[in-house]
Image (cartoon, grey):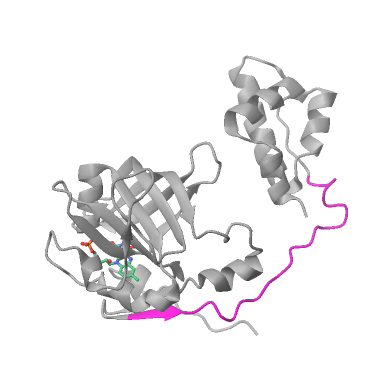
Amino acid sequence: MPRKKEEIRIRPFWYSDIWIFPKLITVITTLDKEGNVNAGPYSHIMQFDVMQKSPRMMVGFRQESHTFQNILATGEFVVNCPSADYLDDMMETARFWPEGVNELEHTRFTMIPSRKVKPPSIDECPQIAECTVDQVIHLEKSSGIIIANIEAIVMDEGLEQMDRSERIPAMNLPVGLGDQSRRYYYHAYTDNVKMHELKEPPGGQKGGKIKMTMKWDDLAVEALMNVPVAVRQMVSERLEEHAQAKGATCVTAQHMVEMSEEYGIDEELFARFRT
Ligand SMILES: Cc1cc2nc3c(=O)[nH]c(=O)nc-3n(C[C@H](O)[C@H](O)[C@H](O)COP(=O)(O)O)c2cc1C
């Protein structure tokens, strides 16, 4: 029996009031034009470019927020991810403090210098991204989206080497579950984590039908078959675009070598998708 469904009227703040988006909790630090520190929690954040050549994130803001204004003025910000032990401090930075107030002074957070940008980082955050502005998108009157270059990813020592099963409890990052009426904020703890193994279909590494729109020489096809199946279609499309841009009518292994260098598509990337 299908479950009974109903269509919901879409009202302002639908994304928060009715739809549940479990999200990352961050505290973004910025400087205003006079160099005063500002901090506020931000959760509308996700990766924008997954390649290492120009890693980027996108973040959504209310256009009047001090954080958005400071980023427009200075072009820099830091995304700090606090552990769940610091949820109270994170909420303290959400209060509507007047302009020029350093919210961090009302918390247990400690400022430390960042490596590549001027706004400070927060020591108590195991995972930090130092960012500069790549693009700004103003969505009418509602929100502003910043697409940011990641200048540095800084983590507590030792985390990188850990297996995910160890890193999740070591970082203890909370999950944001939104708010009721902009007042009651809900969070979850990552202490009940389940692991699922993604299994290859039979013959998986060999399989994966690839749509090719150009001629490919044998060496290029062989090289493509070494690309993990999860990214093979994407790599083949990029490769055809690359060969066409070079004015070629046939994709060759040389095109793959050139493109690997240009985009950072290398063994390190492929290893990521191998089991
Ligand atoms: C957990 C949490 C997540 C938030 N995420 C966002 C967000 O992604 N975008 C946004 O505009 N406001 C968000 N807010 C609201 C801002 O943090 C709040 O308006 C804050 O006062 C802004 O500070 P600022 O003006 O110093 O930047 C969030 C608040 C909380 C508590």
264 is higher (above) or lower (below) than 74: above
**In the rendered view, does 33 fall on the left or right side of 18?**
left
Q: Position of residue 60 (x, y in %)?
A: 34, 56
Residue interval drawn in magenta:
185-208
Q: Residue at x 15, y 68 (%)?
A: 97
Per the picture, the main secondary structure of the magenta-coloured stretch is loop
115 is higher (above) or lower (below) than 221: below
207 is within the stretch colored magenta: yes
Q: Quadrant of the N terminus?
A: bottom right
Q: Quadrant of the C terminus?
A: bottom right
239 is higher (above) or lower (below) than 172: above
Q: Residue at x 70, y 70 (%)?
A: 196
**In the rendered view, does 160 fall on the left or right side of 200?**
left
Which quadrant does ligand 1 occupy? bottom left
Q: Nearer the viewer, residue 74 or 50?
A: 74
146 is within the stretch colored magenta: no
Q: Nearer the viewer, residue 11 or 71?
A: 71
Q: Position of residue 151 (x, y in %)?
A: 42, 43
Q: Residue at x 65, y 76 (%)?
A: 194
Of all residues, the one furthest to the top in this rendering is 247
**In the rendered view, does 118 fall on the left or right side of 3?**
left
Q: Nearer the viewer, residue 193 or 34?
A: 34
Q: Position of residue 87 (x, y in %)?
A: 37, 76
